[in-house]
Amino acid sequence: MIHLAGPYLLAAVLAGLGAYGVLARRNAVLVLIGVELILNAANLLLVSVAAAGGDRWAAGNVLTLFVITIAAAEVVVALAVVLAVYRLRGDVDLDDVDLDDATVGEGQR
Amino acid sequence: MTALDVAFAAVGLITAASGLLAVTTRHVVHAALWLVVCLGAVAGCYLVLGAEFVALVQLLVYVGAIVVLVLFALMLTRAPIGPNSEISTSRLHRVLAGVLGAGVTALLAAALVPIAGPAVERHDTSTTQVAEQLFGTWVWPFEILSLLLLVALIAAMAVSRMTRPEQAADEVQAAQVQAAQTPSESA
């Protein structure tokens, strides 16, 4: 026997922490950490609904696996973009991202 | 409070605390390492909820692969070691972000907790069941996801190898100018 209020509450907390992480970070890689926390909140919700029973086709578990796969693909592409930005500008600060030619030239110098 | 509730409260507290540290710490590398603790504790939550295969995949893919990628990216972008306030926004911005994060939590909790209801019998999903459904009902989404991973791989390679032609030409020109200037200066 398990109360589902605990998992639901934890999913809400993780989503809130992830939103804070996305909004309060300037380093682009650390913003991705916030995104991961939000995705984990969604996964936790799926698994806890599966634990309550009643989902057909093991949907809660299988969809969680799918979300984990998509998260891996998302992180790979996002980090490639972050590294490309770093090569162009010399930092990954999101406060003054401006990919105009002038900025790129300054980053090169 | 049942035994499972107590177990979930324990791993849940670790998850929430390490997640909070991951988004608030001023050490860049510590944020990634707290993320390891947080995702590992989420795997523990899955175990308590009776999803053993998902817990293992969480450990393998998230903790084993994604966090290592994040650490690599931090290394390649020359992340500073030691406390650094530059990685977070200004204080006002952080307060606003905190209000918004708390709002998200309050909204989701207000929507979800009332529908939780009384304690339910835990419904375990065995790995056999997951495998049967994954390669039965869900086989086409599964195959398309493998295509998605391939596309992501190619896209990441294309993005990371991308240079702009005019920029490459500028660099060659700058190198030639510098090479031409250096002897005249030394002479």
Image: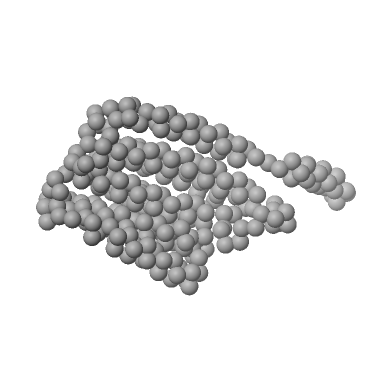
Depth check: A102 or B138 in front?
B138
State the residue in front, B134 or A88. B134
Point out residue B122 in the picture as x, y percentages from the top left corner.
16, 44
Q: In this view, does A69 lie to the left or right of B74?
A: left
Q: Is residue B59 visible?
A: no
* A92 to A64, vertically: above or below: below
- Identify the residue at image location x=37%, y=62%: B104
Horizontal and vertical percent position of residue A56: 26, 37
Residue at position x 34%, y 41% in the image: A64
Q: Which residue lies furthest to the bottom in this view?
A: B92
Q: Residue A1 vs residue B87: left or right? A: left
Instruction: Give above or below for A52 relative to B80.
Output: above
Work out whether residue A86 or residue B126 is closer to the camera in this orientation and state it: B126
In-image side of B111 versus A66 (left or right): left
| Residue at (52, 60) in percent of width and height | A26
Count of labels shown? 0
Residue A33 coordinates in the image, percent (x, y): 43, 52
Rendering quarter of residue B57: top left
Residue B13 image point, x, y percent: 25, 57
Here the colouring is one colour
Query: Is A33 drawn above or below residue B25 in the view shown?
Result: above
Q: Is residue B114 above or below residue B165?
A: below
Specify the quadrant that holds the C terminus of chain A.
Answer: bottom right
Can residue B148 be seen here?
yes
Residue at 52% of width from left, 46% of height from top? A78
Along the viewing direction, whichever of B70 and B177 lies nearer the viewer: B70
Quadrant of res A69: top left
